[in-house]
Amino acid sequence: MKYKKGMGTEPIDYNALLKQLQKRDRQAFDLLYRDMRVTLYVVAMSILEDEPVAQDLVQEFFIDFWHQQLHLQIESSLKGYMVRSVRNRSIKLLKKQQTRRRRQSAIPAPEELLPPSQRLEHAELMAAIHRALKKVPKGAAEVFTLYYTEALSYAQIAEKLHISVHTVRNQLARALRILRKELKNQ
């Protein structure tokens, strides 16, 4: 077993270690885990900046590495492959977290969860929109309501009102133009 590390003096032969991994040698995997765990954790931590998440990501990588036999895909450097994999997984997770936060912040909070001052602002805004909506022609107001209140798509609105998608688009644009003008004057 040439790949084994001595008492901390001999470096690991990663090429020999890779060959043993490809033979499903559990001792080779254990040695690789002990040798690379901290390095991969540092890589994940530098990107994610969250200790428990970085630890979990590295653990999941090692589990996938062994069970999905990812080591069979390696054609060059074992260490390089592992560092790149953890780096890519970290970046992907970070982007996923950012997207989730962005989507959550875009969802309006139910009115009862808003602080009292924001509830008042919300109520005043809704009242102003309802007043301004009375100045919008009936067809355009109906399209606006279906699109923004019921969250129907252009195609669904067109089908429901028996009009073309082009008409839906025009009616919605008309309603928004009038509402902007009315709300700006209030």
Image: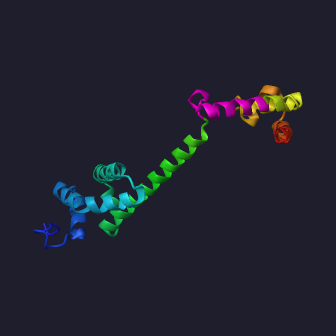
Residue 78 drawn above or below residue 92:
below
Magenta stretch secondary structure, dominant: helix
Q: Quadrant of the N terminus?
A: bottom left
Is residue 1 among the parts visible in the rendering?
A: yes
Q: Is 60 contained in the magenta span?
A: no
Tell which of 171 and 81 is nearer to you.
171
In the image, is residue 110 part of the stretch drawn in magenta? yes
Q: Quadrant of the C terminus?
A: top right
Q: Looking at the image, which residue sits at the far front?
A: 117
Q: Is residue 33 left or right of residue 75?
A: left
Tell me where residue 91 sits by quadrant: bottom left
Seen in the picture, residue 173 relative to 84 is either above or below; the reply is: above
Residue 165 coordinates in the image, percent (x, y)? 81, 37
Q: Quadrant of residue 175?
A: top right
Percent from the top left, x then y, of residue 106?
Answer: 60, 41
| Residues drawn in magenta | 109-129
Q: Position of residue 43 (x, y in %)?
A: 36, 62
Q: Position of residue 17 (x, y in %)?
A: 21, 65
